[in-house]
Amino acid sequence: MNKDVLTLDDLAGKAGVPADRLAEWTKAKLLKPDGFTGDKVPLFASGSLERVALVRSLADLGYGTEEVLKIIKKVGLPRDGHGRKRAPDKDHFLTVGNLAERSGVSPRTIKHWEDKGIIEPDMRTEGGFRLYSESYVFLCQLIRDLQLFGYTLEEVKAVSDDVRTFLAIEAEPDSFPKAEVEKRLAAMLEAIQALFDKMKLLEDGVERWQDLLKKKKKDILALQAKNSKRGKEAREASDG
């Protein structure tokens, strides 16, 4: 999880540059956000501090916006703390409220899942805001499905752990011993089969209930019509 994400105000505080000036530089594309929240709030990696320092030093020397842009294009982007160029792609991140609205799960439930270790934010801002990638919308819906299937939170966490393990192995298979990979993948296949078996039971149960409810609905409508007719007959007899 990347904890080195900064909002504009966080970046301003760390860089010692007023937030409104950073906003101007961002608008002029002297600064480039590394991502955005679902509310379009720009987010910056900690490596942006280097770029801010570069822009500020050039601005202090009297260079205008266009001149600074040309210089930066010629010099190149600052590299992050791992020696890599910052990626040009922009990620969109969701706040807890955004995630709750998109997934149909309450913020309180999301926080509870966090406390249980089922999910964890992709990153946190310096101010403590939790941010999630778009993939968490689908993940939260899947977790809710598992609970509807009768899975306990402990069982849901086991599934979540399996997903994280799979992604880690898929990304860097050579970083795990061959025997460990085989053991973990075999366990995942067993878990998948167990879920298939449970889903089959649920499908059979849903089918039984659908048949039962359809039949009972007809019976209730027939009884309702009979009862309504009985009231009408009683009124006619009284009038007669």
Image (cartoon, rainbow, N blue to C red):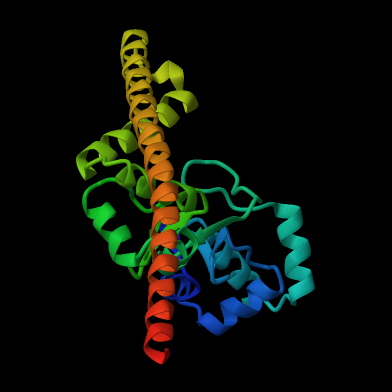
Taking the image as drawn, is residue 152 in sight? yes
Q: Residue at x 68, y 68 (%)?
A: 30
- Return the x and y of residue 37 as percentages of the image width and height: 52, 65
Residue 158 lies, with reference to residue 192, above or below; the image says below
Query: In the figure, residue 74 lies in which quadrant?
Result: bottom right
Query: In the figure, residue 40 lies in which quadrant?
Result: bottom right
Q: Residue furthest bottom?
A: 239
Query: In the figure, residue 68 lies in which quadrant?
Result: bottom right
- Return the x and y of residue 113 as percentages of the image width and height: 27, 53
- Return the x and y of residue 108 as percentages of the image width and height: 28, 65
Viewer-nearest residue: 69 or 144: 144
Residue 6 lies, with reference to residue 153, above or below; the image says below
Taking the image as drawn, is residue 1 in sight? no
Q: Residue at x 40, y 85 (%)?
A: 235
Q: Residue at x 34, y 12 (%)?
A: 177
Task: Answer with left or right where residue 8 lies relative to residue 146.
Answer: right
Task: Answer with left or right where residue 106 lies relative to residue 62.
Answer: left
- Return the x and y of residue 72 as percentages of the image width and height: 71, 59
Q: Residue at x 33, y 46 (%)?
A: 148
Residue 177 lies, with reference to residue 95, above or below; the image says above
